[in-house]
Image (cartoon, helix red, strand yellow):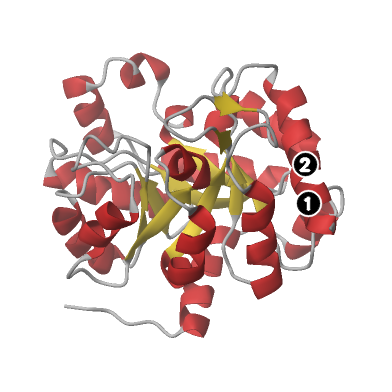
């Protein structure tokens, strides 16, 4: 079964999940603090604040004027379970009440931050029951976008649940080109989507893509209709290190302007991975993005 969307219908579907129950006036009021081009969404991957609790992370986002978030599962799963993984994680996923996720959604709504997507890991060893439950969690959080560091081979198992729940799954890439079952290149993305429904899409990490010696600008020009959101980070080519924005090889400015100039509905989520105080460095990242968008 293949589900086809018009671009307008696709935009409505994504935005309905991104906005959740967020009040428009609160969103506009916060966005003015960062002063972005109309319609451009500059968000954050909450992994950027992995050094602190969810409550503290939300407080930092609000302080920085951020209004859109891709929620890392490490901020959702209790730490003692997240670190153990295995059977403890499987049991938690299957037994935790959906009210737990409703409460997290309410925290974001109260802070005036749109919960744009849930970032949950699904691998070959993840049971069908856990996959189904991950979709229920995503919807309980008030979004219809699930980003995932999945594998190429597991996508065929994920697709029926994506169609059943009407939730978009965006495959996340790293730079592990030596692992053919991991997403890292245009070819692995193509294999992951082959023969599957329109619910299977891409969460393009432009930093990792650059580190894998791929060209994010060229890829976005060709595949922007399949890209749900991007991760913005700077890295050197040839699997090089993470760097402050503007010091690596990732064409951040070109990518952001490409989204702006074409008015693509592709949120750009900053993912802070290089060392430093997260709030200080996130402010630097935001300022860098704002300045390149002003040019």
Label 2 Cα neighbours within 10 Å, binned few <14 / some 14-19 / many ≥20:
some
Residue at x 25% of width, y 71% of height? 197
Residue at x 43% of width, y 60% of height? 144
Q: Which mark is residue 292?
A: 1
Q: Does 205 sit left or right of 161 as displayed?
A: right
Residue 225 visible within the image? yes
Q: Name the image quarter holding residue 262.
A: bottom right
Task: Please provide percent x and percent y for residue 223.
Answer: 43, 68
Whole-angstrom CA distance, mark 1 to mark 2, is 6 Å
Task: Please provide percent x and percent y for residue 25.
Answer: 80, 62
Label 1 Cα neighbours within 10 Å, binned few <14 / some 14-19 / many ≥20:
few
From the viewer's perspective, is residue 84 above or below residue 30?
Answer: above
Residue at label 2?
A: 288
Q: Image quadrant for the N terminus? A: bottom left
Q: Name the image quarter holding residue 258.
A: bottom right
Task: Please provide percent x and percent y for residue 129.
Answer: 15, 45
Marks 1 and 2 in Cβ contact (< 8 Å): yes
**Callout 1: SS:** helix
């Amino acid at each position: 079964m293949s589900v086809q969307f018009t671009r307008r219908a696709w935009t409505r579907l994504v935005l309905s999940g991104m906005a959740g129950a967020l009040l428009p006036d609160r969103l506009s009021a916060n966005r003015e603090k960062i002063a972005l081009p109309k319609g451009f969404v500059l968000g954050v991957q909450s992994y950027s604040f992995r050094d602190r609790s969810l409550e503290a992370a939300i407080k930092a986002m609000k302080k920085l004027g951020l209004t859109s978030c891709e929620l890392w599962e490490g901020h959702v799963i209790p730490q003692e379970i997240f670190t153990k993984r295995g059977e403890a994680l499987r049991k938690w996923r299957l037994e935790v009440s959906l009210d737990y996720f409703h409460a997290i959604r309410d925290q974001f709504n109260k802070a005036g931050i749109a919960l744009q997507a849930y970032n949950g890991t699904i691998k070959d060893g993840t049971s069908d029951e856990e996959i189904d439950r991950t979709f229920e969690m995503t919807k309980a959080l008030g979004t219809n976008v699930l980003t995932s560091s999945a594998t190429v081979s597991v996508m065929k198992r994920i697709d029926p649940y994506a169609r059943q729940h009407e939730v978009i799954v965006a495959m996340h890439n790293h730079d592990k080109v030596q692992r053919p079952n991991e997403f890292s290149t245009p070819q692995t993305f193509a294999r992951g989507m082959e023969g599957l429904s329109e619910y299977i899409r891409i969460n393009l990490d432009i930093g990792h893509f650059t580190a894998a010696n791929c060209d994010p600008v060229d890829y976005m020009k060709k595949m922007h209709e399949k890209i749900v959101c991007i991760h913005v980070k700077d890295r050197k080519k040839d699997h090089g290190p993470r760097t402050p924005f503007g010091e690596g090889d990732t064409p951040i400015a070109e990518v952001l302007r490409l989204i702006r100039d074409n008015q693509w509905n592709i949120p750009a989520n900053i993912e802070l991975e290089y060392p430093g105080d997260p709030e200080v460095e996130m402010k630097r990242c935001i300022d860098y993005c704002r300045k390149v968008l002003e040019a």
